[in-house]
Image (tube, rainbow, N blue to C red):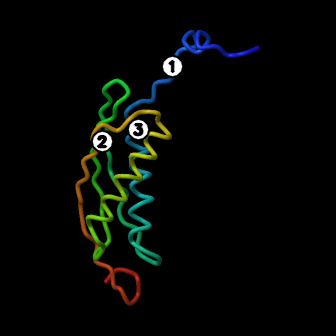
Amino acid sequence: MTVTGLDTLVRGSTTVPRQVVARIAEQAAAETAASAAGRGARPAARPDADCELYGRTAVLRLEVDLAHPVPLAATLRSLRAHVVRRVEALAGVSVGRLDVEIRALRPQDPARGGPR
């Protein structure tokens, strides 16, 4: 049996709830924030995300804690790119907008790699 374009149309579609998209964004942001903090750093508070869906387009708002000092512009570029990639790959929606708020900068002791 082969699948044709008509078969695909008849089968329907999967809808991913906005809360699931937000949770995917939170996890992706946590992955990036943890790697930016460096080895041995104290885990930051879990990122918070809100999501609104407009058809197949997500509008996301993230609140994150970041280690300090880190190059903020580069860290945020990396975070945004990773979140967009993960949300689009896992939820199957495009990210139309992603706002990131830095909730806190967590000082790190460079000699120990942990909090001061």
Helix, strand or loop at label 2? It is strand
Q: Which mark is residue 13?
A: 1
Q: CA distance from mark 2 to mark 3?
A: 9 Å
* Earlier residue among tags 2 and 1: 1
Label of residue 60 in the image: 2
When the figure is inspected, residue 82 is found, relative to residue 14, above or below; the finding is below
Q: Are marks 2 and 3 in contact (CB under 8 Å)?
A: yes
Circles 2 and 1, Cβ within 8 Å, touching? The answer is: no
Q: Pinpoint residue 93: horizontal percent, then vertical percent.
A: 41, 33
First in sequence, mark 2 or 3: give its number: 3
The answer to whether 102 appears left or right of 36 in the picture is left
- Label 3 element class: helix
Q: At x 41% / y 38%, what residue is drawn?
A: 21
In the rendered image, which quarter contains the N terminus?
Answer: top right
- Find disc 3 in the rendering and name its residue: 21
Q: Look at label 2 and name its amino acid.
A: Leu
Task: Name the kind of residue labelled 3 in the image.
Answer: Val
Task: Tell whether 8 sits left or right of 60.
Answer: right
Residue drawn at (33%, 35%) of the image: 58
Image coordinates for residue 36, horizontal then vertical, percent:
39, 68
Residue 106 location, x and y as percent?
28, 72
**Kind of residue at disc 1:** Ser
Of circles 1 and 3, the one toward us is 1
- Going from the N terminus, do you reach mark 1 or mark 3 first? 1
- Crowding around mark 3 (Cα neighbors within 10 Å: few <14, some 14 to 19, many 20+) is many
Residue 61: percent from left, percent from top: 27, 45
